[in-house]
Image (cartoon, helix red, strand yellow):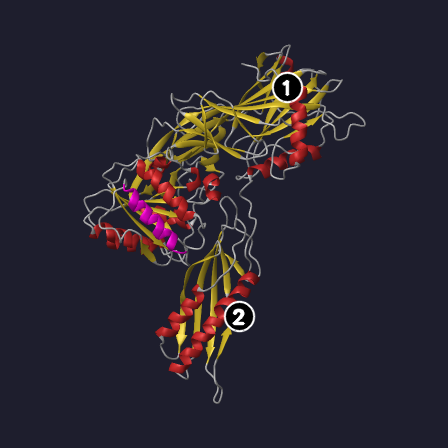
Amino acid sequence: MRSFLGDGTWARRLACCVAVGLLLGPSLTSADEITSEPLEEEDGYEAIEEVAYELFVEAGQDYAATLRIRVALHNASQSTRDVIHTLALPATAELEALAVAEGGRWSAGEATTLRESTGRRDPGTVYVRAIEPKHASDIPAAQIVAFSVNAGATIQVEVVARVHPRLRGDRWELDLAARCVDCLGLAPERRTTVEGLEPGDDFYLDDAGHEAKTLASSRPQDMVTLGWPAHLRRRAALDGRYEVIPSASAVDEGEVRLYLQLGLTQTSVPDHVIVAIDRSFSTPENLSRAAVSFLGSLFQGLPPATTFDALAFDRKVTPLCDGLDRRPLVTDAEAMRTVAAALNQRSRGQGTDLAFVLAEAARRARSEGLSRKRTLVIVITDGMFPSRVTPLEIETAFEREVGSLRPEVLFVVDEPMFAGAGLPPDHPVVRVATKLGARISTATLAQLDSTTSRGVLAAPQTLGDLRLELPKNLTLLDEVPTGLVAGSFLVLRGRYEGKRPRSIRISGRSAGKHLSQRIAATTMPSQPAALVARTSGELDGAAEEGFARPPWYRPSEEAKAEQAIVRAGRVGRSRHGHLDHEIFRHYLMTRVYPRARACYNRALVRTRDQAGRIALEIEVGKGEVMLARIEEIQLVHPDANLAECVTEAAWALDIPAGELDQQIYRIRYPLRFVAPAQGYPSGRVERISDDVMELLLGPAGEPRAPAEVGIEAVP
């Protein structure tokens, strides 16, 4: 194994580290802690510094890869010191090996046990143990303990783990947590590379390409995504791995892990593309510009004879190519400029009528004689659809207009919060895609360029009705979701008693087809409770003693380090803002109620004794009214004009969006219309007190917020 200290001295690295720490200050969402043995009157002083940090990923076959994290620790004090270093690991990481080096000579470690009590160990002994996540949304970590590092010495520690990266489009990805807490004890850069790539492949840090066999630097205080090309040998639509880990202490029990993922599908090469671009208020203002750029890159990779059509939609649909003399080719630059100009002229509006735009796309494909063509409908959206319009209603509207050859549907969900964390299975766009058998890409348009846009056409389809046939002696510890989502890697844990389960059958429905597969068990060694290595001397004694924390390491310090790991794993997924009942009450009273009152006064001109009640139903997401309709109406005299006017009043609700708030809110707003008494010029509109607001969907990876007064949390 090679040394990575380079030609620079530890002093230069330490000076740089201190400078970065002073400039940047503390980070509240970063991981990794280093704590050295304190002496008297050394408050705020770290005797041992991490002077280098490198991360290597060895790209493996199919769903697993090997992760190696190397740190160099230098004792800058005048006495021997212990050090404890806590390192965040990517999700699904499992410790496999440990190695240490001093003076460039590496020594491999071996498995050992954990000791509950504290204790001292021989100089040069290094242990590592896994810190398991306490919650499903947390990430694992490794805790390194090095005893009696000599004054002025530098030791290198390599922790090896097995990881299961996330598959997004045609790329594997690992999220690397922000790690710099105060930068006084940690290296000023994080150097990363991917090894074992095929010829011509590069790896990516936050979608910036880097040549293979090079070390790319990133700021340690940033959370970054490491990616590399996926070359799956198996291309099953539904695939996974089933691992059985027998207990080390008993022969008739053990653990199981089931990894499930939608495999890559064949890249769709259409003859005709219909693009539907979401122009509702919840989408970013620059979405149209980003969509045109993405389409330009995508069309470059399609056959020159491919034709296209384009629509913009909110609750209405606007054709963007109808002014052209013919159906344009993807190579027609002038037609693309026409589409861009039409998009710029079309302002954003309230509502997201997905059923309408899909039906219109299918109708246009059928009416233009494209029934014998392979047609692809690409919906570019932020994924915020009203939940009251069911997937069945959308599918029915789509199927009603489909010709003899059903178009394929691809959702490009341009929402940065979903690009890394993935889409929750209960999100509206997921439920719709599952019903339609559509594909979903969660790559934001800003991440795509001419070399990566084509990978969107290989986005996996969603899977619904997920079912597992389990042996009777196997119990799962995790809840099984109803389906699988593109870009997500499902890991289920469980335990068995008695005979080892040999296989599990998984099944579901995708694109209207039933998928079923039996996965045979692979027996795996259990993750060691701890590992030990030595810079010199024999391992036997250290392995027999087992892992122990030194007596000076306080429980409060350990709790602080573990909490930093938890915060780092949740970075980018915290909810920064939300709307409550009082906010909605204010905007309903100032925007909807006055308009409803004006509607009723106009109705009284038509019918003097008109009275009754109307209950409005409104769905709001990211500041947009996605759906507004009458849920209940009881009038003395039927009045379609009044109903239409009150519905438009609901569409006029203008409400701010909470910062990074991905929740969908449903509001029920009942109004009572009271006819004027004799001699009075106008009637009254009263807001009925039984209005209800429901919190339908929280951010990806987070539980729904608890119910507040006047808010009903939907289970």
Q: Nearer the viewer, residue 647 or 428?
A: 647
Q: Nearer the viewer, residue 290 or 660?
A: 290
Q: Earlier in the sequence, mark 1 or mark 2?
A: 1
- At which x and y percent is residue 8? 62, 17
Q: Is residue 249 left or right of residue 155?
A: left
Q: Is 316 placed above or below 217 here?
A: below
> Is residue 94 one of those drawn in magenta?
no
Question: SS at mark 1?
Answer: strand
Image quarter (top left, top right, bottom left or bottom right) of the N terminus: top right
Crowd band around label 1 with a 10 angstrom C-alpha radius: few (<14), some (14–19), many (20+): many
Q: Is 243 placed above or below 643 here?
A: above
Majority secondary structure of the magenta segment? helix
Q: Is residue 650 left or right of residue 127?
A: left
- At which x and y percent is residue 433? 35, 47
- At which x and y percent is residue 302? 28, 37
On the image, numbered disc 1 is attached to which residue? 126
Residues in magenta? Answer: 332-347
Name the residue type under label 1.
Answer: Val
Q: Which mark is residue 536?
A: none
Q: Is 38 placed above or below 297 here?
A: above
Crowd band around label 2 with a 10 angstrom C-alpha radius: few (<14), some (14–19), many (20+): few
Name the residue type under label 2.
Answer: Ser
Q: Quadrant of residue 39?
A: top right
On the image, numbered disc 2 is attached to which residue? 689
Q: Is 263 placed above or below 10 here?
A: below
Q: Nearer the viewer, residue 539 or 476?
A: 539
- At which x and y percent is residue 147? 69, 19
